[in-house]
């Protein structure tokens, strides 16, 4: 076996959006990474198509939100429409709140775009090694790291790479998860599906009523790129190997369409629904679909994985740079596993509601009711907002100090899948406030801990120790909206979640340093 490559601090396995996001985040911390991807190139398929508002906030910090928005669909495409066939009129519709228009709770708006537009931007966001066509086939843990065996899928050459940690983002069919003996819980495979990418002029039926997805009784349609292209996806037919894909898509369009689509690509895939039993095994950490495979309803799969990376990467950086203790990595699973389970429940429920809409329509047609009558949706129009689930995530772990003086409001004010209620409680995302034109409180977070306070002079002298940190001034009005007195403060983690809160003056000169030591599990206090 040939000699070892240059050793990375973190070996990232999987070059989809989650692995590429982790690579870009770790690069901002100066962490040496190598990413390996078993496929020989970035995905040419549209696949994941929704970048929600929280992911856009994360990409804003990486400088990618503006170029993503520039190449994405216009906000009016942030809508779902239900039709009998694509050529028919809508019998139901719902908005994707947070995508179809800005929301005041965020400086960003989610976008509808295709994975093949997102991944090149992510790839260019860091200048660290990426090896396509290379697969991890074995690994062994040592006292201070991991030895991974990598196989080049084109030439068969094998190499050994040593890393301090491995971040496994290698998808629902992960090699690493079973290799580590990590099981899964949940429904499992929900069915086999096929995506067909094709060219056709469908403007007659869609230009005046744009949407990201058109659900029909014969599969679902969606525009691929603003400049053209379409995709159809539905249940894989029994005769898939010999299927007439142009004919199948043509029939799904409707008998009156008179369109013969030009098929570009066909991909078969399995819709999975599970969560890994744990997200960490020693020095290997799971993220994205390797940790939780979610049904596509609501577009939460990729976005949940992006949030995984955001939660994990600052913790890896802290451990590798010595200002955090190794136990901080345990909080990754403690914080993200409950989110994965809630999100799985939400997407499974959403899938059932989609089926219910179609069932109501079939019953309407069977009973002879007027086909132009709308179907009353079994949810509010805000169902697809999911802002409570996306922005209202509340972490509970040793990396959040909930024993600081009392905080206002209910324990979990945001109901998953519905409304989001900003709160300054520890564990929650820092509320978005405009610090200056175009500059949000979320922009003040980054590769450091941020202390938000209306009294910077009192707090800045209490900083110290090994932790990267900054102080950010709040106006009296902003402090009041965060339920802070004239000398209070919020300590916010690099991932934008509140770590600790002091409504009034610090209880002692060492309170801030002791809080940072407790949050990071270090001895620097």
Image: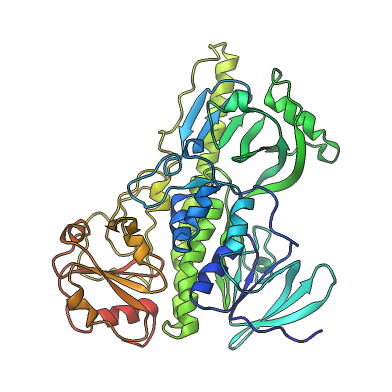
Q: Position of residue 379 (x, y in %)?
A: 43, 33
Q: Who's the residue at 63% across and 60% down the image? A: 16
- The residue nearer to you, when weighing 160 against 226, is 226
Q: Who's the residue at 44% across and 50% down the image? A: 53
Color theme of the render: rainbow
Q: Position of residue 90 (x, y in %)?
A: 53, 23
Q: Is residue 273 visible?
A: no
- Is residue 412 toward the left or the right of residue 43 in the image? left
Picture quarter containing residue 281?
Answer: bottom right
Total numbered circles: 0
The image shows residue 288, relative to residue 360, as above or below, that is below
The image shows residue 511, relative to residue 298, as above or below, that is below
Q: Quadrant of the N terminus?
A: bottom right
The image shows residue 195, relative to residue 167, as above or below, that is above
Q: Is residue 118 visible?
A: yes
- The residue nearer to you, when weighing 170 against 185, is 170
- Is residue 320 toward the left or the right of residue 42 in the image? left
- The residue nearer to you, when weighing 498 against 448, is 448
Q: Quadrant of the C terminus?
A: bottom left
Q: Position of residue 524 (x, y in %)?
A: 34, 87
Q: Who's the residue at 61% across and 51% down the image? A: 117
Spot the residue most to the left: 486
The image shows residue 302, relative to residue 324, as above or below, that is above
Q: Who's the residue at 84% across and 72% down the image? A: 156
């Amino acid at each position: 076996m040939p000699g070892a490559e240059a050793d990375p601090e973190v070996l990232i396995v999987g070059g989809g959006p989650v692995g590429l996001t982790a690579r870009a985040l770790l690069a901002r911390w100066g962490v040496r990474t190598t990413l390996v991807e078993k496929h020989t190139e970035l995905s040419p398929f549209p696949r994941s198509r929704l970048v929600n508002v929280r992911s856009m906030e994360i990409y804003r910090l990486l400088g990618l939100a503006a170029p993503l928005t520039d190449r994405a669909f216009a906000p009016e495409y942030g809508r779902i429409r239900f039709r009998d066939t694509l050529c028919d009129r809508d019998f139901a519709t719902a908005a994707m709140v947070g995508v179809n228009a800005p929301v005041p709770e965020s400086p960003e708006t989610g976008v509808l775009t295709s994975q093949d537009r997102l991944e090149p931007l992510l790839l260019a966001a860091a200048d660290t090694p990426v090896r396509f066509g290379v697969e991890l086939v074995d690994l062994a843990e040592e006292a201070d790291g991991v030895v991974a065996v990598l196989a080049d899928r084109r030439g068969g050459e094998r190499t050994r790479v040593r890393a301090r940690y491995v971040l496994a983002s290698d998808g629902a069919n992960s090699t690493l998860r079973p290799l580590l003996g990590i099981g899964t819980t949940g429904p499992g495979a929900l069915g086999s599906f096929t995506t067909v990418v094709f060219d056709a002029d469908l403007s007659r039926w869609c230009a005046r009523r744009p949407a990201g997805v058109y659900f029909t009784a014969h599969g679902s349609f969606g525009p691929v790129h603003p400049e053209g292209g379409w995709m159809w996806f539905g249940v894989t037919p029994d005769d898939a190997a010999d299927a007439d894909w142009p004919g199948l898509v043509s029939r799904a369009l409707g008998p009156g369409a008179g369109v013969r689509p030009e098929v570009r690509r066909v991909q078969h895939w399995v819709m999975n629904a599970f969560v890994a039993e744990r997200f960490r095994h020693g020095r290997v950490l799971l993220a994205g679909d390797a940790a939780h495979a979610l049904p596509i309803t609501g577009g939460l799969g990729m976005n949940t994985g992006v949030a995984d990376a955001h939660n994990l990467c600052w913790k890896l950086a802290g451990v590798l740079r010595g200002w955090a203790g190794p136990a901080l990595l345990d909080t990754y699973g403690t914080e993200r596993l409950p989110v994965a389970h809630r999100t799985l429940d939400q997407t499974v429920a959403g899938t059932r509601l989609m089926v219910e809409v179609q069932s109501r329509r079939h019953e309407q047609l069977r009973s002879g009711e007027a086909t132009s009558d709308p179907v009353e949706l079994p949810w509010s129009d805000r169902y697809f907002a999911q802002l409570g689930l996306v922005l209202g995530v509340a972490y509970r772990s040793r990396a959040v100090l909930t024993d600081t003086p009392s905080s206002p409001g209910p324990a979990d004010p945001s109901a998953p899948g519905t409304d989001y209620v900003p709160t300054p409680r520890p564990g929650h995302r820092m509320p978005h406030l405009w610090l200056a034109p175009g500059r949000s409180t979320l922009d003040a977070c980054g590769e450091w801990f941020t202390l938000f306070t209306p009294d910077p002079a009192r707090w800045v002298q209490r900083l110290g120790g090994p932790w990267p940190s900054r102080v950010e001034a709040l106006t009296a009005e902003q402090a009041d909206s965060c339920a802070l007195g004239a000398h209070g403060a919020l300590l916010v983690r690099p991932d934008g979640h509140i770590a600790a809160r002091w409504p009034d003056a610090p209880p002692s000169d060492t309170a801030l340093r002791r809080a940072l030591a407790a949050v990071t599990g270090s001895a620097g206090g």
